[in-house]
Image (cartoon, rainbow, N blue to C red):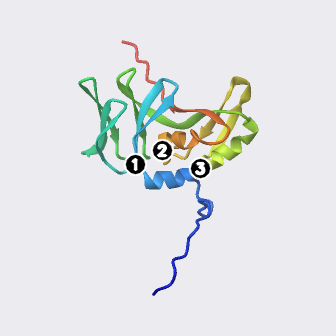
Amino acid sequence: MGQPLRKRTFAPLELAGVALLSLLTAVAQAQVLSVSSDAGRVIVMPGGPGTLQGTMVDGVNVSVGVEDEFRVYRAVFRGETHVAHVALEGPPRHMAFDPAQARFREVTSSLLVELDDYSRLNEVVEAIGGISGKSYEQLGFAVVRLPGTANPGEAAQALQDHAGVNNVQVQLSRPLNVPL
């Protein structure tokens, strides 16, 4: 007979200071997530090098591909195809499809976070590999800045179950208001 099987136990995930968000970003480059934003629920699509073929999220068929010098985001919603083109050059940009407005908007590298105890903000920032956090306790929220390479949708998703976090929203860039 061979050696008896030994039961292996694993310590909690600690990878020499690698934050949860770094691990999430590396493992799930092409993940599409439905998250809360200042405009309501939006579908955040990845900005990394991967492509994504026809994934259904909240009734929207989304895909990400590359055409010429652009990353092309597509969303088929209520029989209409919506498209956004982002140059491949430069830092990754994450796009979100907003079903309420039936259009794409860029996701910023900041999250709006509501906490039970704002003295624990640094804990939250570290948990997702954020760059910094600023508390606006009197207004009922804090802003957490993420590295430009981080996927804000994944960070928001990771914070949903974090102790002391009541609500998390990705922030969308404001559309340009061009007079007609």
The residue type indicated by label 3 comes to: Gly
At 46% from the left and 55% from the top, the residue drawn is: 26
Task: Give the residue pinned by disc 3.
Answer: 129
The residue type indicated by label 2 comes to: Asn
Is residue 73 at all visible to an observer of this figure?
no
Query: Residue 40 in the image: x percent, y percent?
Result: 48, 24
Give the spatial CA distance, label 1 vs label 2. Answer: 9 Å
Viewer-nearest residue: 21 or 57: 57
Task: Give the residue pinned by disc 2.
Answer: 151
> Residue farthest to the bottom?
1
Q: Earlier in the sequence, mark 1 or mark 2?
A: 1
The residue type indicated by label 1 comes to: Gly
Is residue 167 at all visible to an observer of this figure?
yes
Q: Earlier in the sequence, mark 1 or mark 3?
A: 1
Query: Residue 135 in the image: x percent, y percent?
Result: 70, 34
Give the spatial CA distance, label 1 vs label 3. Answer: 17 Å
Viewer-nearest residue: 117 or 172: 117
CB contact under 8 Å: marks 1 and 2: yes
Q: Is residue 115 above or below residue 155?
A: above
State the count of labels: 3
Q: Earlier in the sequence, mark 3 or mark 2?
A: 3
Query: Residue 146 in the image: x percent, y percent?
Result: 56, 44
Q: Rate crowding at label 2 as few (under 14), some (14 to 19) or many (20 or more) other CA atoms within 10 Å.
A: many
Task: Give the residue pinned by disc 1.
Answer: 48
Query: Residue 99 in the image: x percent, y percent?
Result: 37, 24
At 68% from the left and 38% from the top, the residue drawn is: 164
Q: Is residue 18 above or below residue 142?
A: below
